[in-house]
């Protein structure tokens, strides 16, 4: 009897899973570092979709999303930046004055905790936010049940 092989491990990347990759760049908090980071991305012909900066006296963490995350990661590694990748949700805010309220209410109904949130640079889909949650799967199920539009990295692509 042949031994059974364990199932192959897979990541969310490349699957039809409504999550997006956030790239966190760790760098010294020095004049010109943000420009160097942005030039590196621009030279790779990559568009920044979202940006959030956390700083301290000595270092900064720049959280980014890109239209071409694989190209961005390659360029950042080649330029010597220290990076990490995290899976987040990107959700289109419903029309009206209470878009955030409706997202938070839906997530609360399933007891999903939100770690942090930041806006996405305007997309064709409309106003949207990126958010870190304690359970991607539960948050996705909940938001889909409440008819929210969740974005994938394919939604960030610009042009052909």
Image (cartoon, grey):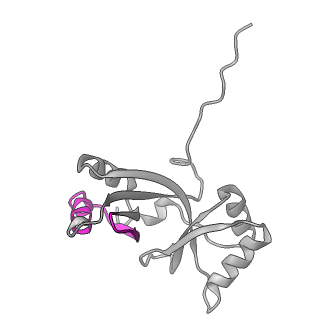
At 27% from the left edge and 51% from the top edge, which residue is drawn? Answer: 75
As displayed, is residue 24 above or below residue 118?
above
At 56% from the left edge and 58% from the top edge, which residue is drawn? Answer: 19
User: Where residue 122 sits in the image (x, y, percent)?
Assistant: 43, 79
In the picture, which quadrant includes the N terminus? top right
At 29% from the left edge and 52% from the top edge, which residue is drawn? Answer: 81
User: Where residue 13 sits in the image (x, y, percent)?
Assistant: 51, 48
**Residue that protrudes farthest toward the bottom in the picture:** 97
Whether residue 54 appears in magenta in the rendering, the answer is yes
As displayed, is residue 103 above or below residue 62?
below
The residues colored magenta run 34-58
As displayed, is residue 153 above or below residue 3?
below
* 103 and 63: which is toward the camera: 63
* 121 and 83: which is toward the camera: 83
In the picture, which quadrant includes the C terminus? bottom left
The answer to whether residue 84 of the structure is visible from this angle is yes
User: Where residue 32 sits in the image (x, y, percent)?
Assistant: 20, 68
Whether residue 49 appears in magenta in the rendering, the answer is yes
Quarter of the figure with residue 69: bottom left
Q: Is residue 122 found left or right of 128 in the rendered image?
A: left
């Amino acid at each position: 009897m042949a031994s059974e092989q364990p199932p192959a491990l897979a990541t969310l990347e490349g699957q039809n899973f409504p999550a997006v990759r956030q790239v966190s760049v760790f760098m010294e908090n020095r004049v010109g570092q943000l420009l160097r980071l942005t030039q590196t991305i621009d030279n790779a012909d990559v568009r920044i979709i979202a940006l959030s900066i956390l700083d301290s006296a000595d270092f900064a963490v720049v959280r980014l999303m890109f239209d071409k995350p694989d190209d961005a990661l390659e360029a950042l590694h080649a330029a010597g930046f220290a990076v990490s990748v995290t899976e987040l949700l990107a959700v289109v805010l419903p029309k009206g004055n209470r878009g955030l309220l409706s997202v938070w209410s839906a997530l609360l109904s399933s007891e999903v905790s939100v770690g942090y949130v930041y806006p996405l640079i305007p997309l064709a889909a409309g106003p949207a936010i990126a958010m870190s949650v304690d359970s991607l799967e539960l948050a996705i199920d909940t938001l889909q049940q409440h008819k929210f539009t969740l974005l994938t990295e394919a939604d960030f692509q610009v042009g052909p």
